Amino acid sequence: MTGRRPVTERADIRISWEMPATPSGLAGRVERFMGPGKRRSESAVELGGGALCALLLAAGVWASGAVEGWSAAQLAVVALIGLDLVGGVLTNSTNAAKRWYHRAAPGARRARLLFVAAHLAHLAAMGLVVLSGDWLWMAGNAALLAVGAVGVEFAPLHLRRPVSMVVLTAAVTVNLFWLDVPPQLAWFAPLFFLKLVVCHLVPEAPLERARDV
């Protein structure tokens, strides 16, 4: 047999799971929540890209004319959730977040699932305040989130990325045809499931350019 040996590393790429120490108290909790050891370049993309995407989202919602018919409470919920989802997609994609949330620690899986579960509050706020008590929409998306999160988290390691894409695609499709919302809110489901089941739950190696290349 003349098969090649598997390539286990690349000279131009370094994988780093090293995490710096974090301070105690509130500052440390915030740093751990965002991902310890975030580089300036990561923060720049997160802040700059987040601002761009948030502006595009706000412009689209404004252009739809929906704002004129919303109450102050509805407007506040949409604005806060929109900012959280845009920022969350970018934050949970960083090396710093991947290192922290997918670290080899006994409570890491529980922390990831609790993070996902906390976002049921987003569904409640959108369903009760913005969609005027649409219980079918809330229950349907809560079920999709629960089943999808468990499916990704407990899938074999090498299948978690494609399983997350199945969950995202299925959730977006169900929302388009059976859990539909006004067009100005069509962004919610894609960003919601992208943030949680793809960006947050999928373990990915924190990649860096090798310093000696």
Image (cartoon, helix red, strand yellow):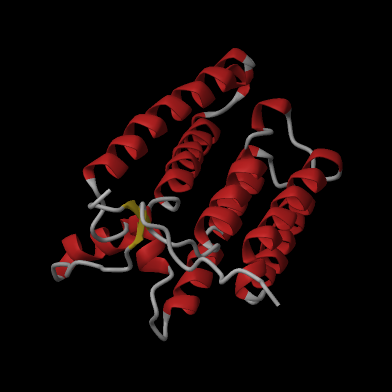
Looking at the image, which is closer to me, 144 or 204?
204
Looking at the image, which is closer to me, 70 or 113?
113
Instruction: Quadrant for residue 187, please give it.
Output: top right
Instruction: Quadrant for residue 202, please give it.
Output: bottom right
x, y percent for residue 175 = 77, 44
The N terminus sits in image quarter: bottom right
x, y percent for residue 17 = 33, 68
Residue occupying image coordinates x 56% and y 56%? 196
Instruction: Quadrant for residue 107, please give it.
Output: bottom left
The residue most toward the right is 177
Q: Is residue 92 above or below residue 42?
A: below
Q: Is residue 17 left or right of residue 162?
A: left
Looking at the image, which is closer to me, 13 or 70?
13
Q: Is residue 4 above or below residue 144?
A: below
Residue occupying image coordinates x 48% and y 39%? 86
Residue occupying image coordinates x 25% and y 65%? 29
Residue occupying image coordinates x 24% and y 48%? 39
Q: Is residue 85 left or right of residue 172?
A: left
x, y percent for residue 210 = 29, 53
